[in-house]
């Protein structure tokens, strides 16, 4: 598998994984400053949220596009990896940050999926569990039926939370429902859309317009909230994972990198070992682990 990933794959999506992972890490690094940002820092913070929060959607789109290989040994390997970093991070973080011992935290570290310690990983395993049935559902519904289902799901769980702010779910898209929608979009693209025939120029133009519009909306929301509450800080409701802006931008970014037809052993090598780095960075608190799913479970 390692040899295939390094020498056999085109590097467009490998580069997307690297950039998306770095973007998410950047968000985590600046997270403590987001609640107090003012002036120039406010504009930078909104930019970071607007651009980089698309990363998780990109990971799930890649997973959805290639599908999930629900083999027992791969699940065991992935679970053991998550378990290892979860326990290690619990052992290291108290030493580094001076946090005290907690029975609750210890228990969560040994049950990272059940405790939702890594929200993306919990969502992924739920989707993987039903992946075979999802494929059967897509086959049964066909192109038109799947398209109508996606539109209905996007209206209820994405459009309404985006433009009315209030949401049926309280996870802002960081949960199995939104990830299922993204996964289903990936399956739809793989089955019925010839991505390689989509215009790169039109896709790039649409992405710039989308990010620009979203940035203006998030800046406006942050300024208006600051005036109303008298507090600073980034407020980016249009950059939430469930936002139609985030979902649409994820699709456009995926298309751009999928269209890249080139190979780089260096890029492929760099992409492969980042799973552990990402888990360490997350520390089980703010982190997610989307990188691994697109690495270990593609068909």
Image (tube, helix red, strand yellow):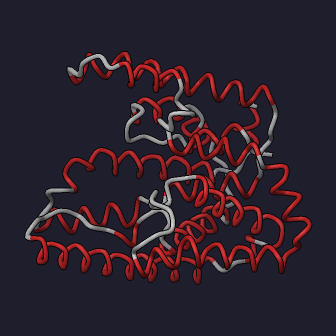
* x and y, in percent, of residue 201 in the image: 58, 81
Query: Does residue 218 appear to the left or right of 60 in the view shown?
Result: left
Residue pictured at 83% horizontal, 72% vertical:
192
Q: Which of 182 and 148 is in front in this view?
A: 148
- The residue furthest right is 140
Above-or-below relation of 60 to 251: above
Q: Report which quarter residue 287 is drawn in.
A: top left
- Which residue is depicted at the point 66% across and 58% down? 180
Residue lying at 51% horizontally and 21% vertically, measured from the top left: 110
Q: Residue at x 25, y 61 (%)?
A: 45
In the depicted structure, whether residue 277 falls above or below residue 238: above
Tell me where residue 12 appears, x and y as whole percent: 62, 55
Q: Is residue 12 visible?
A: no
In the picture shown, does residue 178 fall above or below 294?
A: below
Measuring from the top left, give residue 95's x and y in whole percent: 26, 16
Q: How many labels does the image show?
A: 0
Furthest residue toward left: 230
Where does the image place residue 43, in percent across and percent down from the top left? Answer: 21, 69
Q: Nearer the viewer, residue 229 or 268?
A: 229
Q: In which quarter of the image is the N terminus?
A: top right
- Residue 91 in sight here: yes
In this rendering, would 240 be left or right of 198?
Answer: left
Give the quarter of the image for residue 111: top right
């Amino acid at each position: 598998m390692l040899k295939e990933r390094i020498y056999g794959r085109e590097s467009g999506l490998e580069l997307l994984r690297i950039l998306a992972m770095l973007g998410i890490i950047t968000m985590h690094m600046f997270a403590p400053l987001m609640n107090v940002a003012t002036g120039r820092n406010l504009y930078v913070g909104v930019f970071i949220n607007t651009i980089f929060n698309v990363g998780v959607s990109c990971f799930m789109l890649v997973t959805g596009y290639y599908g999930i290989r629900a083999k027992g040994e791969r699940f065991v390997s992935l679970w053991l990896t998550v378990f290892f970093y979860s326990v290690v991070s619990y052992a290291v973080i108290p030493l580094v940050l001076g946090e005290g011992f907690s029975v609750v935290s210890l228990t969560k570290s040994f049950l990272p999926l059940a405790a939702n310690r890594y929200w993306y990983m919990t969502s992924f395993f739920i989707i993987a569990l039903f992946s075979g049935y999802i494929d059967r559902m897509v086959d049964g519904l066909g192109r038109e039926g799947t398209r109508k289902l996606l539109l209905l799901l996007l209206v209820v769980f994405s459009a309404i939370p985006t433009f009315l702010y209030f949401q049926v779910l309280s996870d802002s898209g960081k949960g199995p429902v939104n990830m299922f929608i993204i996964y289903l979009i990936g399956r739809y693209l793989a089955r019925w859309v010839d991505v390689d025939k989509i215009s790169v120029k039109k896709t790039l133009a649409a992405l710039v317009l989308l990010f620009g519009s979203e940035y203006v909306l998030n800046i406006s929301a942050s300024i208006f909230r600051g005036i109303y509450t008298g507090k600073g800080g980034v407020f980016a409701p249009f950059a939430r994972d469930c936002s139609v802006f985030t979902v649409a931008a994820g699709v456009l970014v995926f298309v751009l990198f999928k269209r890249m037809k080139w190979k780089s052993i260096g890029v492929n090598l760099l992409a492969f070992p980042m799973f552990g780095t990402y888990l360490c960075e997350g520390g089980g608190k703010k982190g997610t682990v989307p990188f691994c799913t697109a690495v270990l479970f593609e068909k």
